[in-house]
Amino acid sequence: MPGSTFGTLFRITTWGESHGKGIGVVIDGCPAGLPLKAQDIQEYLNRRKPGQSRYTTQRSEPDRVEILSGVFEDRTTGTPISLLVYNKDQHSKDYSEIASCYRPGHADYTFDAKYGFRDYRGGGRSSGRETIGRVAGGAVAARLLSALGISFCTYTRAIGPVQIQNFSREEIFNNKLYMPDSEAAEKASEYLESCMAAKNSAGGIIECVIHGTPAGLGEPVFDKLDASLAKAVMSIGAVKGVEIGDGFQVAASTGLTDNDGFHIRPDGIIEKTSNHAGGILGGISDGSDIILRAAIKPTPSIASEQQTVSRAGEEITLSIKGRHDPVIVPRAVVVVEAMAALTLADALLMGSVSKLENLYKIWK
Ligand SMILES: Cc1cc2nc3c(=O)[nH]c(=O)nc-3n(C[C@H](O)[C@H](O)[C@H](O)COP(=O)(O)O)c2cc1C
């Protein structure tokens, strides 16, 4: 299956299925000398681990990462970094019924249309567990970026109709929904309870703010930074929309409002006076915060009866058994951050050769 590799110079290849032996990633292109321990990657993986609350799947997986290669004496060696997480709590029996039919909102029908055969257990490669490889790879990318002063703040902006009204950075890790507003988190919990009682599910919006990116990252034309971020985030299962800066709101704006003016700071640095563009102009970072949002659809697996068809061509009704997230958003927060980190790490390495003076700094 092509399409499991992302990035040009900082490149990941992910592998593994939901109910196979394990899931993993190979990271190629990470510079040598970066301090890296399994715990750095584990902290990222723990943010997407199942079973964190009533609102995430009760599949009980420790998701312990093992570093197989590319790290020696807690530093990257510059060779491929191979990371592995074993699957422990597969209940493949739960999926025997769906082997012979197509779950609404899932990739069953399209995988069969494409391959004529699929690993139906837990959705195989199209499962949310596929994101383990992305998150593990993203943790390494984020470590590289952090060494260069680039940091992330990623959180839940909305669950269903409940939007955050206030912002407290500390609050993000105080509630299980990763919302920076405790009141909104409480309202969102009530909304989720009502969805669960109705055997239904919810979606939401994730926002990622990237701080400390220098001006000049991103390649013109096809590999623009905003285009690369959109591809990275849109490739996550259940993401149905991506916005940069004011996003879809620009359609109702005017040039006077939307344009960000420039001024010169007392230290001589050129800076924008506002940030409607979300930190990217002409596909190249402008030095202000990069602001990215992802719209996540409601979890497709729901216990309510739905209409579908069997592989044999009969019309049937189906209600999904098994353990599922009633909302995907909280677990996908770190997945969005990981994909953004991978995109920026790649852009940084690519950007290192954009000027002759950079080559002089290294080689002359
Ligand atoms: C972190 C994460 C966890 C997910 N968990 C579930 C789940 O428990 N149940 C489910 O039906 N879908 C889950 N999904 C979504 C499906 O994998 C996805 O909707 C499906 O493969 C169809 O792909 P599409 O929505 O991109 O079209 C999850 C996705 C992510 C990113």
Image (tube, rainbow, N blue to C red):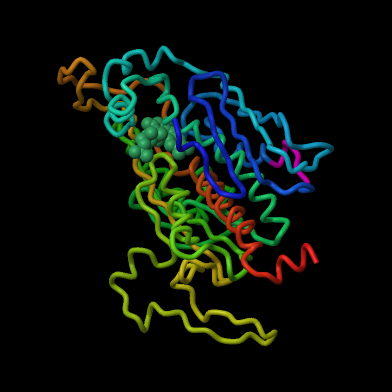
Q: Residue at x 64, y 41 (%)?
A: 28
Image quarter of the N terminus: top left
Q: Nearer the viewer, residue 220 or 235?
A: 220
Q: Is residue 55 visible?
A: no
Residue 78, image x and y in percent?
74, 43
Q: Nearer the viewer, residue 15 or 300?
A: 15
Q: Which residues are magenta?
A: 35-40
Q: Residue at x 72, y 39 (%)?
A: 79
Outermost residue to the right: 73
Q: Nearer the viewer, residue 294 or 327?
A: 294
Is 88 magenta? The answer is no
Q: Residue at x 35, y 47 (%)?
A: 240
Q: Quadrant of residue 146?
A: bottom right
Q: Quadrant of residue 71?
A: top right
Left or right, 129 with reference to 11:
left
Residue 83, image x and y in percent?
65, 32
